[in-house]
Image: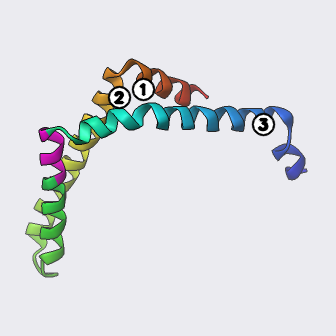
Amino acid sequence: VEREHDSAPELVASRQALERARTDFAAASAPVLEALRATPGFRAAVAKRDEIAEALQRLRPNQIAERARLTKEQLANQADLRKQEQAAIAADPTAAAALRRSVSA
């Protein structure tokens, strides 16, 4: 019964539409994200991300307060990187439209 359901024409068509939408979004967002990665602000945020990761690796197990501080900083940095990526995609009409299609697929 499950195999019949998985091969139902409506489900197959939906999966194909979702995969097309994801592929379209990846293609539309790739040049936008590549351009973003070349900007000084994004590069600085990536350098900060790497710096925090290295600092976390160097910590000794008993450095709990410093680990908590760095983890909080790491989360803020990740949020900043995501925000920059989302803003770049939203600012590009083609990438933004592809995102909307992928979400609604």
Give amino acid for label 1.
Ala
- Residue 76 at x, y = what percent? 18, 47
- The structure residue drawn at horizontal position 56% and vertical position 37%, both measured from the top left corner, is 23
Residue 20 circle label:
none
Viewer-proximal residue, 33 or 64? 33
Give the SS element for disc 3: helix
- The structure residue drawn at horizontal position 63% and vertical position 38%, both measured from the top left corner, is 19
Q: Which residue is mark 3?
A: 11
Highlighted magenta segment, given as a residue range = 40-46
Question: In front: mark 2 or mark 3?
Answer: 2
- Residue 28 shown in magenta: no
Give amino acid for label 3.
Leu
Q: Main secondary structure of the magenta part?
A: helix
- Residue 44 shown in magenta: yes
- The structure residue drawn at horizontal position 18% and vertical position 56%, both measured from the top left corner, is 49
* Distance (Cα) linking label 2 and label 1: 5 Å
Q: Which residue is mark 2?
A: 89
Residue 95 circle label:
1
> Sequence-wise, which precedes: disc 3 or disc 1?
3
How dense is the environment of label 1, judged by Cα within 10 Å: few (below 14), some, or many (20 and up)?
A: many
How dense is the environment of label 2, judged by Cα within 10 Å: few (below 14), some, or many (20 and up)?
A: many
